Amino acid sequence: MPDPRILVIVLAGGEGKRLLPLTADRAKPAVPFGGSYRLIDFVLSNFGNAHYTKIVVLTQYKSHSLDLHITRTWRFSNLLGSYVTPVPAQMRRGPFWFSGSADAIYQNLNLVHDEKPDIVCVFGADHIYRMDPRQMVADHIAHGGGVSVAAIPVPIEEAKAFGVIEADENQRILAFHEKSQTPPTMPGDDTRCLASMGNYVFDTDALIHAVTPGRLSESPLDIGGDVMPRLAEEGLARVYDFSTNSIPGQDEREHSYWRDVGTVDAYYDANMDLVASVPVFNLYNDNWPVFTHSPPMPPAKLSRGPSGRLPEVSDTLLCHGAIVSGAIARGSIIGPSGFVSEAELDGALLFSGVSVGEGARLRRCVVDKNVAIPPGFRLGIDPEEDRERGFTVSPGGVVVIPKGAVLAPRD
């Protein structure tokens, strides 16, 4: 049997309100992660490593930086018809934007008709994980059904933010509950729920019929809210167990790692997973690399500070072009072209172009691009002081400074 023709649709049009202010000026999938990467790099790297190289990225909300990142980073050889292309809302069905994930696909069915795939992989753009999609496609073909849904157990207290699946012993989905306030737990385990990862493998015909108005009582707008409950009722959906997915070079510590980074606290915690001496998520796996744009910049540098003090750096990622001059950095990420001079960082996440002056102290914070932290400035030390200065402080106590913010020196 010849290999199936695969088209990949990456859904990247979400607004990401829960990540504000990091999404105030960019689409959520374009938010930097781990210093050198963007969130969308992780799903695209999975498909690149799997050699699924016909990829369309559906964009909508504040997509310029996302479009720019895709076009200058994600280029496959076109000799065999490979491509990664951003597709903005084109209003092909009328004068309106995408109303949800299912509507986004419906408005772009011309892409499916043009490519004529056997299988369509519909994946989200803003999760952190490694996955070999070929294994999920093979499982889908072996077991049949209109759609397979990748799933992972999550604690019940987190399940309200996900689509939750009820399945039988044969992995057939009996019911799909999108962001239910009372999600059903897994059989024999009342502490966890089986959550959808937002990754779907569809038979092409099943996808076309599922997103086309007229088949459902109302026009389907969202895959999780509209399409999946109906396909489950019709017995056309089954679970793909993410824990069975095997990645070369991945150890047991990272196996089945998947993080939804929809909130500031979740985003911060996932970044901190990278900096441990033995990281929970390993960026250094050459067998399944995470690809991104690599501009021509000098190496990171550690140097004495103005007073002659030596830097002290531990469990910290230093990106290209970063300079640590006599500073102390623990469990932090210093982004490209960052400059930290005789300051103290503890759990600080600095985006590209951030500078930190002498004597500043930063704790549990995220500082967006091109912000200058004045000498002696305190951030993340006193949450009430941070709130009084107008900074965003998450429920978990993470302080966020928006892109390009101008900070006044402390009195």
Image (spheres, helix red, strand yellow):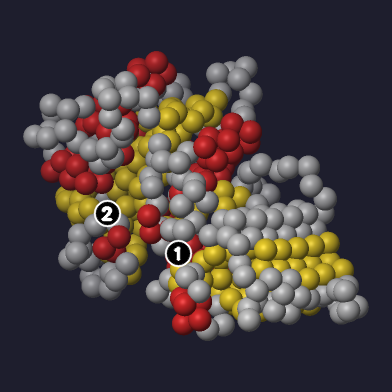
Find the residue positioned furthest to the left. Answer: 217
Viewer-closest of 110 and 397: 397
Res 102 quadrant in image: top left
Q: Which residue is mark 1?
A: 264
Asked which secondary structure carries label 1, the reply is: helix
Q: Nearer the viewer, mark 1 or mark 2?
A: 1
Q: Amino acid at mark 2?
A: Gly
For marks 1 and 2 on the same chain, the one whose residue lies earlier in the sequence: 2
Q: Quadrant of the N terminus?
A: top left
- Residue 47: x and y in percent read 52, 38
- Residue 92: x and y in percent read 32, 21
Regarding residue 211, the answer to whether it shows in the image is yes
- Residue 29: x and y in percent read 48, 46
Q: Quadrant of the C terminus?
A: bottom right
Asked which secondary structure carries label 2, the reply is: strand
Q: Residue at x 30, y 57 (%)?
A: 162
Regarding residue 283, the answer to whether it shows in the image is no
Q: Residue at x 26, y 46 (%)?
A: 224
Viewer-closest of 171 and 308: 308
Q: Residues within 10 Å of mark 2 (few under 14, many from 20)?
A: many
Q: Which mark is residue 163?
A: 2
Q: Amino acid at mark 1?
A: Val
Res 228 quadrant in image: top left
